[in-house]
Structure formats: C-alpha cells, structure tokens
Amino acid sequence: MFDKRLESASHLTLQDVVRSDRLPAEGGIAHAFFTRSGGVSSGIYRGLNVGSGSHDEPEAVRENRSRAAHFLGLTAPDLATPWQIHSPDVAVIDRPFGAERPKVDAVVTATPGFAVAVVTADCGPVLFADEEARIVGAAHAGWRGTVSGVLEATIEAMEGLGATRERIVAVLGPTIMQANYEVSAEMADGIVGDDCEAERFFAQGAAGDKRQFDLPGLIVSRLSRAGVHASFVGRCTYGEEERFFSFRRTTHRGETDYGRQLSAIAITH
C-alpha cells in the first residue's frame, strides 16, 4: 500500500534523471528523461512509475508525477501527457490538458508554464526544442509511430508555431536497443517497406526467422533526414533494469503489468 507519509517527503535529484547537453540547460527551458529512481511505487512498479494506465495504486502514480513536475519547477497538473495510441498525430496546445486527453503521440507548445511530455517503457521518447523561437515538443516514437511519420509531423507542427527546422534540436531518450530487441522477419519487412535505408537497422537474429532491430538508429536517422539536429542518449530500457521500466522485459518474465517512465520538456518562463 502507498504510504501517505512518503507524500512530498523527498525531491528528485540530477542522479534520478537523464539529461542531454544538446538541449537547452538555461534560458527558461527545462527538460528531463526521468528514470524509475526516486519514486514511491512498489512491487513490479518499484520507483517512479508515472503510468496512469497501469494498475499501480493511483495515489502512488500521482505522487510520482508530482515529484517529476517539481523537478522541472512545476506542479503535477502542469504535465501534459496525451493518450498515446502509436499514431503519427500531434496536438498543438497552449494549456495543460483537462479531464479529456487527446489521442495523439506528440505534443507541441510555444506557451510557458507547463511541460509537454510522453510516457514510455521501451519505445522512443523524443524531446524537441527551438531555443531561439522558444518552442518545444515531445513525441512517443515506437516503431509504428516512427514508420507512420510522428517525428516529421512533430517538426512540422513546431514550424507551424514559428520554429525553424535548422534550429530544432531533437534528442532521443532511453529506448530499447538492438541487442535486446528481437523481431520477426515479417515485422522487419513491414518496417522497411519502401524505405531502403531502414534495412541497415536490422541484423540477423539468433534464429533464422528473427532479426535484431535498432529502433534508436532508425529514429535518429529519420530525424536527421528531416533536417534537425538529432542525437541519442545511449541508454537501453531493457538492459538497465535498475534504472528503467521495460514492457518487453516484463513480457519475457510473464509479469502482469509494467511501469512507465516520463520524458518532459517545458518553457518554464
């Protein structure tokens, strides 16, 4: 059971998050790729589970989200996380969501005072910023969203607010990496489709009908081809159990559910 005495009892530190020196560190823009460290959830959700869709105790999830928001200088209601559906769709917003969250996989804003954010547990969380234009975005990029164009759609939405593509910095946070991402040959063929460049992100798996998929490589490649400054933090959600939640690791163990980590960026003032 969630212990109410833990509520707001501690704050997250720099050791509890992953950050990139490619994204603005000052000037009114704050970001973090949160890990599972520093939270109050227990059991299979141990740590900073922010997944409202998980079966974790709601009070624990609320406290975890509050701690993450506080790290960014905000409050829990200031975290705008959409209802993610593995789509290419983007919401352009000027205020946090109310009770109804849009079913999209990316969020973009030019408005200060709240964070745009996504939750992941192996898929790619991508944070975007045009520091000069003061426009930020967050995208949830699994293989479906990546192939269907969620990254490019996020960039276009930022441009619609006044961002310049050549100034946009896009950083991919902790994601499942190739050594731990085995897929079928059929799935690999579907991902490649008409994109011949995507073939280089697959290696032969242990079995003849399996492939090892480099999802981070595909994401960074598509971002670079779109004309933005792209990079990856180089952290694997599956391989670093003490630091990250992983849907695939949970599936391999036959566990009933899994936690989610938050990635967020905000124009704070």
Image: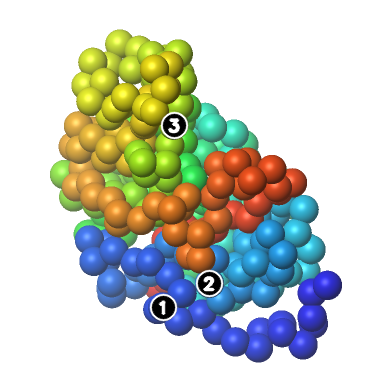
How busy is the neighbourhood of tag 1: few (under 14 within 10 Å), some, or many (20 plus)?
Answer: few
Q: Position of residue 206 (x, y in %)?
A: 39, 28
Q: On the image, numbered disc 1 is attached to which residue?
A: 15
Quadrant in which residue 44 is drawn: bottom right
Total numbered labels? 3
- For badge 1, the amino acid type reads Gln
Q: On the image, numbered disc 3 is attached to which residue?
A: 182
Q: Measured along the vertical axis of the image, is residue 28 above or below residue 248?
A: below
Task: Please tell me whether mark 2 sits on a helix, a strand or a loop.
Answer: loop
In the image, farthest residue toward the right: 1
For residue 148, side relative to residue 248 (left or right): left
Q: Position of residue 42 (x, y in %)?
A: 71, 69
Label 1 with label 2: CB-CB less than 8 Å: yes
| Quadrant of the frame with the N terminus | bottom right
Tell me the mark number nearer the camera, choosing from 3 and 1.
3
Q: Measured along the vertical axis of the image, is residue 145 above or below residue 120?
A: above
Quadrant in which residue 245 is drawn: bottom right
In the image, 3 versus 86, the foreground residue is 3
Upstream in the sequence, badge 2 or badge 3?
Answer: 2
In the image, 54 versus 187, the foreground residue is 187
Q: On the image, numbered disc 2 is attached to which residue?
A: 37
Q: Measured along the vertical axis of the image, is residue 254 above or below residue 198?
A: below
Upstream in the sequence, badge 1 or badge 2?
Answer: 1
How busy is the neighbourhood of tag 3: few (under 14 within 10 Å), some, or many (20 plus)?
Answer: many
Task: Please tell me whether mark 1 sits on a helix, a strand or a loop.
Answer: helix
The span from disc 3 to disc 1 (Cα, nearest Å) is: 30 Å
In the image, 145 versus 250, the foreground residue is 250
For residue 212, side relative to residue 77 (left or right): left
- Residue shown at the point (36%, 31%) measured from the top left: 213
